[in-house]
Image: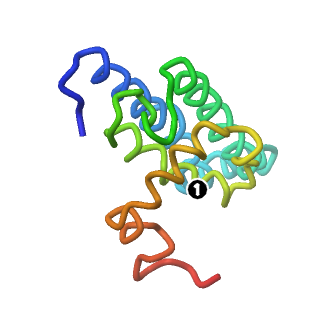
Amino acid sequence: LMPSDPVMRARARQIAEIVNSNIQPLQGTKFLNQLKQESNGAIDPSVWGERAIRTGLEAVEKLAVSFGASRQAFLTGCGHVTVAEIFVVPQLHNARRAGVEVEKLFPTLVEVERACLAMPWVQSTHPDRQPDAPSA
């Protein structure tokens, strides 16, 4: 999951850390509930969460484009799945649930996501296939 090439490894870490430290903490249920409570309802948690996801994925999309990402090159341009895809693909699923227009805003990420979703091991770990997944 971590490329052997140091530049590719840094790219993978950079993308993963945008999700890990910039998106995920600001859109988690516990944080959003606390935000609503402490603002006495003045802050709409769904708007806050959607914005955190959208702005973080905007940064990832820009990086992916600059790295030459594609269906064959994946997010870092190294040609295989890395920790970057492990973080980004589930976040795209979550972004859709939050109302982010993923297909419109992040075409490069969606292209890489499709390549990942074609892999059986990714299909089997999809959030919708987990025992505790909400019914559609």
Residue at figure coordinates x 50%, y 43% from the top left: 24
- Seen in the picture, residue 95 relative to 125 is either above or below; the reply is above
Q: Position of residue 94 (x, y in %)?
A: 58, 56
Which percent across, then down, holds residue 43?
Answer: 77, 44
Instruction: Report crowding for label 1: few under 14, some 14 to 19, many 20 or more residues within 10 A (C-alpha).
Output: some
Please, which residue is most extreme toward the left here? 4
**Frontmost residue, 104 versus 115:** 115
The residue furthest front is 72
Q: Quadrant of the C terminus?
A: bottom right
Q: Amino acid under label 1?
A: Asn
Q: State whether residue 96 is above or below residue 107.
A: below
- Residue 35 appears in which quarter of the rendering? top right
Q: Is residue 100 above or below residue 109?
A: below
Q: Residue furthest right?
A: 42
Q: Who is closer to the viewer here, 45 or 59?
A: 59
Q: How many marks?
A: 1
Q: Which residue is mark 1?
A: 94
Residue at (50% x, 42% y) in the render: 71
Residue at (37, 67) in percent of width and height: 125
For the rendered model, the colour scheme is rainbow
Q: In the rendered view of the protein, which quadrant contains the N terminus?
A: top left
Residue 27 is left or right of residue 6, and the answer is right
Going 50% across and 77% down the picture, which residue do you hit? 133
The secondary element bearing badge 1 is classed as helix
